[in-house]
Amino acid sequence: MKQMGLKAKIRAKKAYRHPAMGEISEHLLKRRFKARKPNEKWLTDVTELKGSDGKLYLSPILDLFNREIVAYAMSRNANSEMVKEMLEKAAPRLTAKGTMLHSDQGVLYRTAGYRELLAQHSMVQSMSRKANCWDNAPMESFFAVLKTECFYNAGELTVDELMKQIDDYMDYYNRERCSLKLKKLSPVAYRTQLAQSACRKSSRCLHFFYGGQLLFLLE
């Protein structure tokens, strides 16, 4: 072709972009992993667990105030219904506007339905920077602890057995597992003790209960 003076026309390649479910929210948390009060800053993520008869996905919400698991949902499929169920379970704990819920940039957190629920409950969405697990480090740390403690010497389990194991562990983690960071108390005991202490110092207190638990008190 060169000798004949001919030139081939090659069609230019088009850049392909995977269709996004929605815009990426701003990284508002900025690794500020301490909270002054309950329900100020929440974290969430999804982890995969393998059972002998399939996969199980776990989606919890962690409160940065005391590292308590506020709510969680489990499903054989990592879909939007799972994260919306998790959010609906956590909603009764909200007593003020502006609770921040931080996650990664996963498509589950960019759906219209999920964002509508956040707006409905007057919550603020925050997202990690792309491919940066350290922006959600306490959540990743919880998953590591759960997988080590919950399934230590557990052997091969079915999905139903995994779910039962997780239910039992979540109750233990919140109510019995003590932490040095929480003055050697469990997450629930730490929150309750601080609330009672604040109430004793005040002549006017409002008690907030949910599921038989004292959440916190306000003057």
Image (cartoon, grey):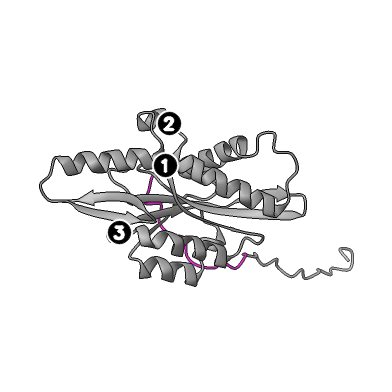
User: Residue 132, can we see it?
Assistant: no
Q: Earlier in the sequence, mark 2 or mark 1?
A: 1
Q: Quadrant of residue 194?
A: top left
Identify the secondary structure beneath mark 1.
loop
Which residue does the image show at 12% across and 44% down from the upper left?
202
What numbered label is drawn on residue 98? 3
Identify the secondary structure beneath mark 3.
loop
Determine which residue is flagged by label 2: 179
Looking at the image, is 67 positioned above or below residue 70? above
Looking at the image, is 158 positioned above or below residue 179? below
Is residue 138 shown left or right of residue 183?
A: right
Query: Which amino acid is tagged 3?
Result: Gly
Residues under numbered marks 2 and 1 in contact, where contact means CB atoms less than 8 Å apart: yes
Looking at the image, is 76 positioned above or below residue 165? below
| Mark 3 closeness class: few <14, some 14–19, many ≥20 residues within 10 Å | some
* Gap between marks 1 and 3 measured at Cα: 19 Å
Percent x, y of residue 191: 32, 42
Which residue does the image show at 37% across and 53% down from the upper left?
212
Q: Which of marks 2 and 1 is in front?
A: 2
Percent x, y of residue 189: 36, 39
| Mark 2 closeness class: few <14, some 14–19, many ≥20 residues within 10 Å | some
Is residue 38 shown left or right of residue 77?
A: left
Percent x, y of residue 154: 69, 38
Q: Which of marks 2 and 3 is in front?
A: 2
Residue bounds of the magenta highlight: 18-32
Q: Is residue 26 magenta?
A: yes
**Which quarter of the image is occupied by the N terminus?**
bottom right
What numbered label is drawn on residue 67? 1
